[in-house]
Image (cartoon, rainbow, N blue to C red):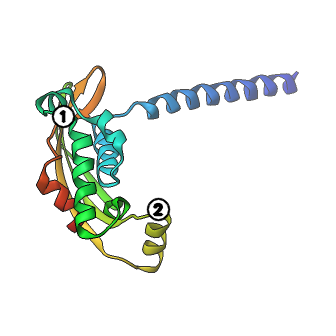
Amino acid sequence: MPKQKMLWAFGLVVILFLGLQALMVFADSCEGASETALSFTKAYFGLDPDMANMVCQEVKESAEADPVATFMNQVALEAENLGHSFNYMRSQLTKYHLETIAQDDKSATIHISGKRKRSIHPIFTYVGRLFFLGETYDFEKTLNLVKEEGEWKVCDDLFNATDVWRIYEG
């Protein structure tokens, strides 16, 4: 009889563990304003066209053309003018710090600062960090986010000519 009670207790613990684990996975998958700001910043400096999915409707509608596509074209032209390939303009975040300045149900202001390193190829950045090769650039941005259709979106115009040059020079 005591063995059967131990098995029941063990089974109950396993079921509770699995239930809590599922709950934690679900909670972790919900992206907040800070996570969106970080994802956007990584995509922005990495020149990932998927950053368009993280831009609010207001910025998209205020531009004559798709602001992300225009920005990417401007970066490609700037790279060509400097004698580099488009990939040379990419950067990868090496260190970062997020600070929530203000947040409510519909908007948030997130300050992100840190260091980034040129990322022609991800292995280049890894080897550079490992052997202290290549320059590291400081960055600092304050992003305004709004909640659209249940998702946080960046609502800043970071796609102008000055920002194209900042991508290159750091």
Give the residue at x 27% y 48%: 72
Which residue is at the front of the view, 126 or 101? 126
Q: Label 1 amino acid?
A: Ala
Q: Which residue is mark 2?
A: 122
Q: Are marks 1 and 2 in contact (CB under 8 Å)?
A: no
**Mark closest to the chain's N terminus, 1 or 2:** 1
Instruction: Work out whether 47 lies above or below 150.
Output: below
Q: Quadrant of the N terminus?
A: top right
Does the image show residue 4? yes
**Mark 1 closeness class: few <14, some 14–19, many ≥20 residues within 10 Å:** few
Instruction: Work out whether 10 lies above or below 72.
Output: above
Which residue is at the front of the view, 72 or 20? 72
Q: Which residue is mark 1?
A: 65
Give the residue at x 43% y 74%: 128
Give the residue at x 43% y 67%: 125
Quarter of the figure with residue 32? top left
- Residue 12 in percent (x, y) is at 70, 24
Cα separation between marks 1 and 2: 30 Å
Q: Label 2 amino acid?
A: Pro
Q: Is residue 18 left or right of residue 112?
A: right
Q: Quadrant of the C terminus?
A: bottom left
- Residue 130 in percent (x, y) is at 47, 75
Q: Is residue 123 left or right of residue 168?
A: right
Judging from the image, what secondary structure is the residue with disc 1 in?
A: loop
Q: Which mark is residue 35?
A: none
Quarter of the figure with residue 56? top left
Give the residue at x 30% y 72%: 136
Does the image show residue 112? no
**Mark 2 closeness class: few <14, some 14–19, many ≥20 residues within 10 Å:** few
Tell which tag, 1 or 2, sits nearer the viewer.
1
